[in-house]
Amino acid sequence: MSGDPDVLEYYKNDHSKKPIRVIDLHCCEQVDSGLTFKRKEFQASFVFDIKTSDRTFYLVAETEEEMNKWVRSICQLCGFNQSEDSHADIGS
């Protein structure tokens, strides 16, 4: 891990030394939480997304509390205001 608080890095597994991708949170335009999907494997999951101008990243937390912590932290870092409908963006 780089230790840079303005990026999220994700890895193939716990033993990987090099990230698969780095998400620059300076490019974050919107964060949504509590998403639902029709795919069976995601129906009971706690999914949130990070939207940039180039791509939308979908992330899955193990619990609702964990998802909310991630969303709060990302929104705080990006300077977003969280709204009641679990949607945060620059215009909020």
Image (tube, rainbow, N blue to C red):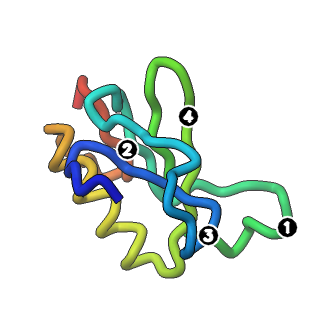
Which residue is farthest right? 40
The reply to whether discs 1 and 4 touch (Cβ–Cβ < 8 Å) is no
Q: Nearer the viewer, mark 3 or mark 2?
A: 3
- Bin the neighbour count of mark 3 within 10 Å (Cα to Cα): few under 14, some 14-19, many 20 and up: few
* Residue at mark 1: 40
> Residue 21: x percent and y percent?
53, 43
Q: Which element is circle 4 on?
A: strand
The residue lying toward the viewer, choosing from 63 and 34, is: 63
* Residue at mark 3: 13
Q: Which element is circle 2 on?
A: strand
Q: Which residue is located at x 20 percent, y 51 percent?
A: 5
Q: Nearer the viewer, mark 1 or mark 4?
A: 4
* Residue at mark 4: 56
Which residue is farthest front? 17
- Residue 70 circle label: none
Q: CA distance from mark 3 to mark 2?
A: 30 Å
- Compare marks 4 and 2 and give the one earlier in the sequence: 4
Q: CA distance from mark 2 to mark 1?
A: 24 Å
Q: CA distance from mark 1 to mark 3?
A: 24 Å
- 23 left or right of 57? left
* Residue at mark 2: 87
From the image, which quarter does the C terminus lie in?
Answer: top left
- Compare marks 1 and 3 and give the one earlier in the sequence: 3
Q: Nearer the viewer, mark 1 or mark 3?
A: 3
Q: In the rendered structure, which amino acid carries the disc numbered 2?
A: His
